[in-house]
Amino acid sequence: MSHAATAHKPPMLKSDEANEKQLDMARKQGDAYQMTLKHMANEEAHDGGEQPAGEYIVAYAVEHAEGMYALKDGKLKWQELTSENVHVEVSVRDAADNRFIPGLNVFATLIDPDGNTVATHQQPFLWHPWLYHYGRNWEVPGDGRYTLRVRIDPPTFMRHDSKNGKRYAEQVEVEFKNVKIETGQKKSM
């Protein structure tokens, strides 16, 4: 079953796994991540936004495409850009405490201003020096206002805590309209 952009705040209850102090530390982690994410969306990216979706808060940011390291044959190798012209980032946070959720299968679809699907890609986890996210470089036809659809499959990872751990069991989808995309490539330093 798929849920659209509706909110459901998961529990954050004292339990045999987490006391109030520990839950407060989790909320502080989430607050710090959220502050960093807002900086990315508002100060670094060309556009960004967020919406609740099931037990998640899903956010996006778009900026110029950028080179990255990838592990090839047991060694990190720098991947130069070819025709990619936009970098799409997706953040998925727990709706209860705002912490980033790793280990998800996140898929994004871009739809152009005429309503045509540009592509659908899995957004792999990306390590970033200051903001974990799911993302990849895309090739899009040009600048404009696009629709971004994000789908998150139920994760297969185990969940601690009999009171707080029953969450993320259903696929969710969220749609962002009027996403401003400015094409280009960042220069490697």
Image: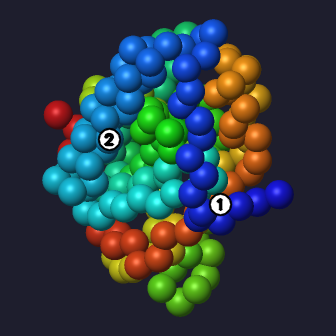
Q: Is residue 15 left or right of residue 34?
A: right
Dot 1: few (<14), some (14–19), or many (≥20) neighbours within 10 Å?
many
Q: Position of residue 189 (x, y in %)?
A: 17, 34
Circle 1 sits in a helix, a strand or a loop, which is it?
A: strand
In this picture the colour scheme is rainbow
| Badge 2 vs badge 1, beta-carbon distance below 8 Å | no
Residue 110 visible to the viewer:
no
Residue 165 lies, with reference to residue 58, above or below; the image says above
> Which residue position holds label 2?
34
Q: Residue furthest bottom?
A: 114
Name which residue lies at 60% across and 63% down.
6
Q: Position of residue 173 (x, y in %)?
A: 65, 60
Amino acid marked by disc 2: Gln
The span from disc 2 to disc 1 (Cα, nearest Å) is 21 Å
The residue nearer to you, when weighing 163 against 146, is 163
Query: Circle 2 — which element?
Result: helix
Image point (63%, 10%), residue name: 16
Towards the viewer: 128 or 141: 128
Mark 2 vs mark 1, foreground winner is 2
**Residue 132 on image: x %, y %:** 40, 32
Nearest the camera: 133 or 162?
162
Q: Is residue 106 left or right of residue 128?
A: right
> Tag on residue 99?
none
Displayed quadrant of residue 2: bottom right
